[in-house]
Image (tube, grey):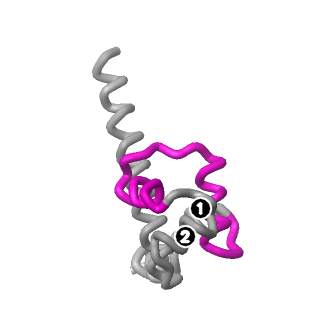
Amino acid sequence: MNSILCCHDIQIRQEVHKLGVLILLWRRQLGMTQYQLADKSGLAQSYISDLESGAIDPRWSTIYRVVSGLGQMSVQDFLNGPQTIRSLRIH
């Protein structure tokens, strides 16, 4: 049982890290600074930094705020990643 929880925790941390990388990639793709994204999403710049580094496991409402701050896209589009990432997945 304990090893199952340990593996589950590792998987969660990996997914949180991937989410942070997506935020970072989208922000850079859109030419935004952490401060700009923080302002548009109503979050602190330090919180954006923590999200991007995978230090925080955000709630869905926070993800929605970040996606809204990135511009007019759906959460699904956000999760699919920027075009540069999608083209890498194809090859």
**Residue assigned mark 2:** 37
Which x, y percent locates residue 52?
41, 60
Bounds of the magenta segment? 45-74
**Residue assigned mark 1:** 66
Q: Which of the image's four quarters has the N terminus?
A: top left
Q: Main secondary structure of the magenta part?
A: helix
Please tell me in which quadrant of the rendered image residue 42 appears.
bottom right
- Which is more N-terminal, label 1 or label 2? 2
Q: Is residue 51 inside the magenta stretch?
A: yes
Left-right relation of 59 to 25: right
Judging from the image, what secondary structure is the residue with disc 1 in? helix
Q: Can residue 6 be seen here?
A: yes
Give amino acid for label 1.
Answer: Val
Query: Which one is in front, 87 or 68?
Result: 68
Q: Nearer the viewer, mark 2 or mark 1?
A: 2
Question: In the image, what residue occupies the spot 36% across and 33% down?
Answer: 9
Neighbours of disc 2 within 10 Å: few (<14), some (14-19), many (20+)? many
Distance (Cα) linking label 2 and label 1: 7 Å
Question: In the image, what residue occupies the spot 51% across and 70% down?
Answer: 81
Q: Can residue 77 be seen here?
A: no
Which x, y percent locates residue 77?
63, 69
Neighbours of disc 1 within 10 Å: few (<14), some (14-19), many (20+)? many
Give amino acid for label 2.
Answer: Leu
Q: Is residue 50 inside the magenta stretch?
A: yes
Q: Is residue 16 above or below residue 65?
A: above
Question: In the image, what residue occupies the spot 65% across and 56% down?
Answer: 64
Q: Are marks 2 and 1 in contact (CB under 8 Å)?
A: yes
Question: In the image, what residue occupies the spot 34% across and 23% down?
Answer: 4
Which x, y percent locates residue 22?
46, 65
Please tell me in which quadrant of the rendered image residue 79 appears.
bottom right
Q: Which of the image's four quarters has the C terminus?
A: bottom left
